[in-house]
Amino acid sequence: MQFELKLTDPLSAARRGTITTAHGIIETPAFMPVGTAGAVKAVHMREIRNDIKAQIILGNTYHLYLRPGLEILAKAGGLHKFNGWSGPILTDSGGYQVYSLTDRRKLNSEGVMFHSHIDGSKHMFTPENVMDIQRVIGADIIMAFDECTPWPCDYDYASKSLDLTHQWLKRCISRFGKTEPHYGYEQSLFPIVQGSTFRDLRIRSAEEIASHNADGNAIGGLSVGEPAEQMYEMTELVCGILPKAKPRYLMGVGTPANILENIALGIDMFDCVMPTRNGRNGMLFTSRGTINLRNEKWKDDFSPLDAEGTAYVDHEYSRAYVKHLFKAGEMLGPMIASIHNLAFYQWLVHEARKHIEEGEFSSWKTAMVKQLSVRL
RNA sequence: GGGGGGAUACCAGAGCGGUCAAAUGGGGCAGACUGUAAAUCUGUUGGCUAAGCCUUCGGAGGUUCGAAUCCUCCUCCCCCCA
C-alpha cells in the first residue's frame, strides 16, 4: 500500500492524497461504507461501485470469523472473491466488539474471550489469531487488535487499557511480520491510537503508534459518546504527532459535520455505520440538513428525494413515496435511503477533496457544517 | 320459532364492585442511532386553566358510600338447533 500526500490546505490541516492498494486507488479524504458481515446492509455491490462510487469498503473480523467462518472464506479465495467486491477492503479487528459486546466477553492480557452473540459459543481472540484471521479474510488493510475504551472512562482504566493495546500491537506486528498474505497481494497493518479523552494518554499513545512506522495509522476510541468538541480536541492533538506522510484513519466517525471538522484537523479516512443504519431507520442526510422520512410532513411532498443529490434514487423517487415505503415496511425504503446516504457521504468527501485542491476548504467547510445541522 | 354469546379508547382485545383514563398488540405521532448483536430501540397516544380537575367502556334507567364491572328495559351484532 502506498500513500501519496498531494497537497495540504494552507488554512487548515486538511490534506489531499491518494492511497494505492492491490485492489485499486483511494482518493483521500475518503469515506468507507461499512460492510460488517461481508455486505453493506441493504445495498448491492453493483450500486456501491456504480451509483455510490465508494472506493473501499469495510468488513469485520469478529463477524466474518463467526459467520461464514474461516474455512469458507479460505475456500472462496478470500473476501473479495466471496462477496464480489473487487475494490479495496479494510477489515476491523474486533476491537470495537470488545467495546460493543462488553457483556459478552472477558478480557485479559492474553486476549479476549467472546461468547458468540449467535450461539453463545466461546471464541478466544488474541493479537496473533486476529492477524491470522485477517490474513484469511484477505483485506487490503487490516487493523491491529485493540481495546476500544468506553466513554466516560476513568483515567486509570484508560491508561491500563492503553498499555494493553500497545502490548497487543507489538504482538500483532510480530505475528503479521511472520506471516504471508494468502492470496498473492500485499496487506497493510494499521495500528490504533487509544487514550480516551485524556490529552496526556493520547499523546503517549500517538507517540507509541507513530514509532512503529506503519503504512497508515488509526485513531480509535472516539465517537463513543463523548462531546464532539472533545473528539476534535483529541484528533487535533493526535494528528499533530502521527506522521504526515502516512494516512490517518479516524475510526467510526461519523456525522457529516464530524467528517468535515476532522478533515480540517488532518484526517484522511473515515468509516461509519451512520449512513446505512440511520438510512434503514428512515433518516436522510442531505447538503441542506437531515430529514426524518417517517415524519408526517412528507406524506404529500412529491418533490425529489434530494433535488441536489447525486444518486439516481434522489431523482427517481419522491419523499412522499419513500416515506410511504417506510410506513408500509417495504424493504425498498431502507434500500433507497441507504443508497442515498452513502452517495451523499461520497459526495461530501468528493467536495471536500475538490475544495482542498482549490484552496478554499475552510470557508466551504464552515458554510457546509452550518447547513448540515438543519433539521428539515 | 327455540337456545346461547357479545357490544371497552383509531383497530383488535384484557378487565368483571373501589388500587381504572382503563393491561397488551397493532396503528398513529415523535425521538434516538457514530470501527453494526440494529429492516433496531425508546417515548407518547381522551380533554383541560395539567403533581389537580373534567368527560369516557352500545343507549336509557336502577342498586350501591362507590359501577366498564351487578339489575331492568331498549338497540345492534354473532353462533347453535328447527
Image (cartoon, grey):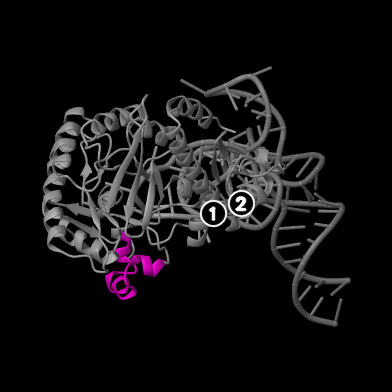
> Mark 1 belongs to which subunit?
A
Would residue A95 be found to the left or right of residue A332 on screen?
A: left
Visible residue check, residue A8: yes
Quick one: label 2, few (<14), some, or many (20+) residues within 10 Å? some
**Residue A98 spot, x, y in % from top left:** 25, 50
Does residue A79 lie above or below A303 as drawn? below
Q: Quadrant of the C terminus of chain A?
A: top right
Numbered tag placed on residue A312 in the rendering = 2
Quick one: label 1, few (<14), some, or many (20+) residues within 10 Å? some
> Mark 2 belongs to which subunit?
A
| Residue at x-position 32% and y-position 68% | A78
> Looking at the image, which is closer to me, A367 or B21?
A367
Query: Which amino acid type is marked by label 2?
Result: Tyr
| Magenta stretch: helix, strand or loop mostly | helix
Helix, strand or loop under label 2 = helix
Q: Quadrant of residue A63?
A: bottom left
Visible residue check, residue A250: no
Helix, strand or loop under label 1 = helix
**Residue A178 spot, x, y in % from top left:** 12, 62
**Residue A47 spot, x, y in % from top left:** 52, 58
| Residue at x-position 72% and y-position 44% | A302
| Residue at x-position 49% and y-position 48% | A342
| Residue A72 within the segment the image draws in magenta | yes
Does residue A305 lie above or below A64 as drawn? above
Report which residue position mark 1 lands on.
Answer: A51
| Residue A276 within the segment the image draws in magenta | no
Contact (Cβ within 8 Å) of mark 2 with mark 1: yes
Q: Quadrant of residue B34?
A: top left
Q: Which residues are magenta?
A: A63-83
